[in-house]
Amino acid sequence: MFATLGDRWTRLMAPLLLAALAAPGSLQANPEMADSISPYLRLHVDDPVQWRAWDPALLEMAKEEQRPLLISSGYYSCYYCHVMQEESFRDEGIAERLNEHFIPVKVDREVDGALDSYLLEFQRATAGSAGWPLNVVVTPDGHALTGVVYAPREQFAEFLDGITRRLETDYDQLADLARRGSEELTQRLREGEEPLSESRAGRLPQVLWDRLEREADDLQGGFGSSTKFPHAPYLHAMLEAEQAGVAPDWVAEFLQITLDEMAHSGLRDVLGGGFFRYSESPDWNEPHFEVMLEDQAQLALVYLRAGDHFGRGDWVELGLENLDFVKRDMALREDETGDRAQTAEDGFRGFASSLSAVDEEGREGGAYLWPEADLEAALADHDHPDLVRAWFGMEGSAVFELGYLPRRGAGVEALAERFDLDEAAVREHVAAGREALIRAREARGLPRDEKVLTGAHGLLLSALAEGVQHDERFREAGTAVSAWLREAASDPEELPALMGLPAEQAGTATLNDYAFVARGLRDWKAATGEGEQAPALALLEVAWERFRDDDGFRSEPEPPLPGMISQRFHPAVHRPSPTTLIFRLSEAWAGASETVDAAFAKYDLRPGRAIENDPEHHARLILWLQERD
């Protein structure tokens, strides 16, 4: 049932040896990784694991060689992705197992998002939870068999050995098990789409609020009692309900607690102004230092709108600082984007998709944490270094091994009294100290993922549209992003997944990309009057025509695995639901497009059982349906 080791060695190594003979310099273990547009894949160029970049054609290769795929999905800024690479993927014993018994495939979840989402859904359904790095065994027929997230080297070796033994003795049985498991998952998703009765559908708002209240931490904010993500889509939906006057009484206080706790804790880079992706502690003070562009865009929008609604000028300033952080620390420069990169017509290069959790020395949080010596050096020329330290809470013993993490410390009034200064002088000293610390931090360097994600720039444009209504300093950035997105969408049928790359490398946009860009262009025009409605409307038309079938919307035009089915309603967990955005845009633009009007009128908007089971994942949809009724 399996090819011999000698045959495999010949097939796998011959192309690599030929490439080495044809090219000058030393042999790279994974030349396919070296040529990737993904910095995450390029990290694995010297792994002894013989990685392949994802390509649906690999399924044919798997059938020919009678070996399953081991698809390993992650992303550049992911801390545990770096850890697993160091512990396992650079280990000769792990590499031998993977190279002999599997076709190892590396996936950047930001490039192949639909594939990653499907594998995550499989892992959640079979293991109860999922995350990154995500490692899933897929049969040559394209059915997921089993998976594991981060595991230490010995546990990962046991996982590989266990599945290899089963494959060698029960290959046909396991292949059939994977096929039936895929069919059962598909059936479960289909059953979740079955419409609820009118009475049950009418109770969905109450089901939603009950679930959110049960999950809400009313002491430290956020949801859950251990690892915490901001879940910006949940917060946005709750804020919209509060603005519309349909939220329960507890929501206003919960939002204020959550936004205050996130703003002043370790989740926020209070020095630079950005937000880390999540915290491993319920008090938000143990971040993993991953910084994602899509998170900055969504949280800036929430803080700006919440600041307006609650009359909190400090939240408005925080949202604007967040956008300043993106402009300063995530803007791409010419020396970062490579020879293949293309710019917008005005030379704009876009923003990095993420900043790594580890610094150039491989230390988690190394770019953000301050050892005593570094702190003293950075503030050596400041008149009141102790004042700056007190403002940023960098006094006493450091919580992290590498040093202090700046966070909210003493306030202006307390510092004025302590240092015998007036409050204006305190603010001046704090501003000067912040600038000195930022200069010192910039000199450290921070690895960045230079991919220019089309969809994330759509999310960012919505935030910039909100920002420019508070301060004109965001007009230039918003105009540049808007112009480049309109340029990328000039042929709506060919919207790329990545901007700034030749068409053959830019990839095909997903449903997320179409929805996020259409909404971003709409928001920018509404805020500034710049641009035309036509490009956004054309994207909406293509979304309806290309991604919709009789069962709902596909995540991408041609899903590569058989279990990647269409769904009527896509969830919103860490980013907005593309289907909910499409519905709301279609309603807002009623009468502007016959194509959109006809498709929207025929679409079955009756909520299904899956929405009742996970109402928080569909919060904005539930509230929108309530508003329509």
Image (cartoon, rainbow, N blue to C red):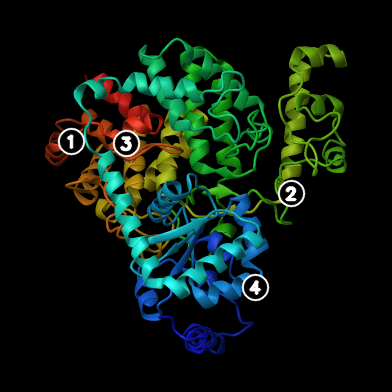
314 displayed left or right of 430: left
The numbered dot on residue 604 is 1
| Badge 4 density bin: few <14, some 14–19, many ≥20, Cα 10 Å | some
Residue in the image at 24% along x and 40% along y:
537
Q: Is the C-beta separation of discs 1 and 4 under 8 Å?
A: no
Q: Position of residue 586 (x, y in %)?
A: 22, 34
For mark 3, what is the residue? 610
95 displayed left or right of 195: right
Q: Can see residue 110?
A: yes
- Please count the marks in the image: 4
Q: Which quarter of the rendering shows the C terminus?
A: top left
Q: Is the C-beta separation of discs 1 and 2 under 8 Å?
A: no
For mark 2, what is the residue? 443
* Distance between the alpha carbons at the discs numbered 1 and 2: 55 Å
Q: Earlier in the sequence, mark 3 or mark 2?
A: 2
Q: Amino acid at mark 2?
A: Ala
480 displayed left or right of 63: right
| Badge 1 density bin: few <14, some 14–19, many ≥20, Cα 10 Å | few
